[in-house]
């Protein structure tokens, strides 16, 4: 089923992109759970507009001891600019043996992940943290209303050099190994098909992430088969 533009008219004026992203993440998790081996499970994790209560940080409540005065933390030695990931649309795969342990992640890029340098930096840092932990990662970027290539920025971070990457729509997969980082990248185009990407689980098997089948099912379940 061809890829639609969920972020610009006419579809954006009829349907909410965040609903499609949410449903797609859930559908990918359902599809993975139907095919992955015993001992693993996938869960969608979708959060939009994450905010921190600034007032809670500006006025910390003193911690009192049973037999002593209340304790107040000292002022910080240094305050620097820092941004957290405000939107998360992902599918997390866990190994269930011995308790849930994160083994892989699929990230669906949202407009907020690309709307400013600090948010792009936060998204790249999140992916880098997963990779440094030995997790396989798949990134899917179908956002048309924001430019920029987060895959290129991730490679620039890892290689400490500028890497020109063409195309704002793409999907990429990463596999950390002792020998280095294996990378798969496929360009995406509106009206075109979606590929099957490999998700390499930490210490486990490789799972096929069928973007075409799951996207098609999402559109059908949301009654967007005709693009309306």
Image (cartoon, rainbow, N blue to C red):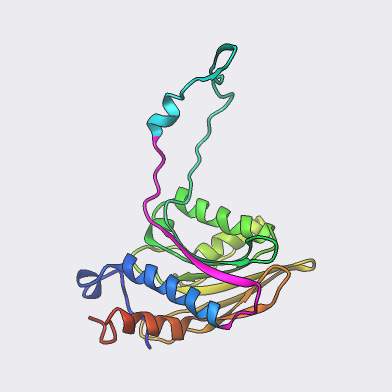
> Does residue 18 lie above or below 65 as drawn?
below
Number of marks in the image? 0
Residue closer to the observer: 150 or 217? 217
Q: Quadrant of the N terminus?
A: bottom left
- The residue positioned 29% from the left and 78% from the top of the image is 222
Residue pushed farthest right? 179
Instruction: Please indicate whether residue 181 sits to the left or right of residue 18 in the image.
Output: right
Residue 112 lies within the magenta run? no
- The residue positioned 37% from the left and 79% from the top of the image is 218
> x and y percent of residue 61 in the render?
46, 23
- The residue positioned 41% from the left and 31% from the top of the image is 56
Q: Is residue 161 visible?
A: no
Residue 48 lies within the magenta run? yes
> Does residue 46 lie above or below 34 as drawn?
above
Q: Which residues are magenta?
A: 35-53
Residue closer to the observer: 25 or 64? 64
Q: Is residue 173 visible?
A: yes
Residue closer to the observer: 135 or 78? 135
Residue 76: quarter of image: top right
Q: Quadrant of the C terminus?
A: bottom left
> Does residue 10 lie above or below 147 as drawn?
below
Instruction: Please indicate whether residue 103 sits to the left or right of residue 62 in the image.
Output: right
> x and y percent of residue 29 in the render?
49, 73
> x and y percent of residue 204 in the render?
71, 73
> Does residue 94 lie above or below 132 as drawn?
below
Residue 96: quarter of image: bottom right
Residue 75: quarter of image: top right
> x and y percent of residue 226 in the render?
25, 87
Instruction: Please indicate whether residue 103 sits to the left or right of residue 189 in the image.
Output: right
Instruction: Please indicate whether residue 166 sits to the left or right of residue 215 in the image.
Output: right
């Amino acid at each position: 089923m061809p890829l639609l533009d969920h972020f610009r008219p006419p579809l954006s004026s009829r349907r909410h992109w965040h609903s499609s992203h949410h449903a797609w993440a859930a559908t990918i998790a359902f599809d993975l759970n139907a095919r992955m081996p015993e001992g693993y499970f996938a869960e969608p994790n979708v959060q939009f507009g994450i905010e921190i209560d600034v007032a809670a940080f500006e006025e910390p409540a003193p911690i009192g001891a049973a037999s002593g005065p209340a304790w107040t933390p000292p002022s910080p030695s240094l305050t620097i600019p820092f941004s957290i990931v405000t939107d998360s649309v992902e599918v997390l795969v866990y190994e269930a043996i011995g308790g849930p342990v994160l083994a892989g992640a699929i990230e669906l890029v949202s407009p907020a992940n690309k709307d400013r340098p600090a948010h792009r930096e936060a998204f790249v840092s999140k992916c880098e943290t997963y990779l440094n932990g030995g997790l396989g990662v798949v990134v899917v970027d179908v956002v048309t209303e924001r430019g920029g290539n987060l895959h290129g920025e991730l490679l620039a971070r890892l290689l400490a050099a500028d890497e020109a990457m063409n195309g704002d729509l793409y999907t990429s997969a990463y596999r950390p190994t002792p020998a280095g980082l294996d990378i798969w990248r496929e360009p995406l185009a509106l009206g075109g098909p979606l590929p099957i990407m490999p998700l390499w689980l930490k210490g486990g098997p490789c799972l096929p992430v069928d973007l075409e089948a799951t996207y098609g099912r999402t559109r059908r379940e949301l009654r967007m088969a005709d693009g309306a």
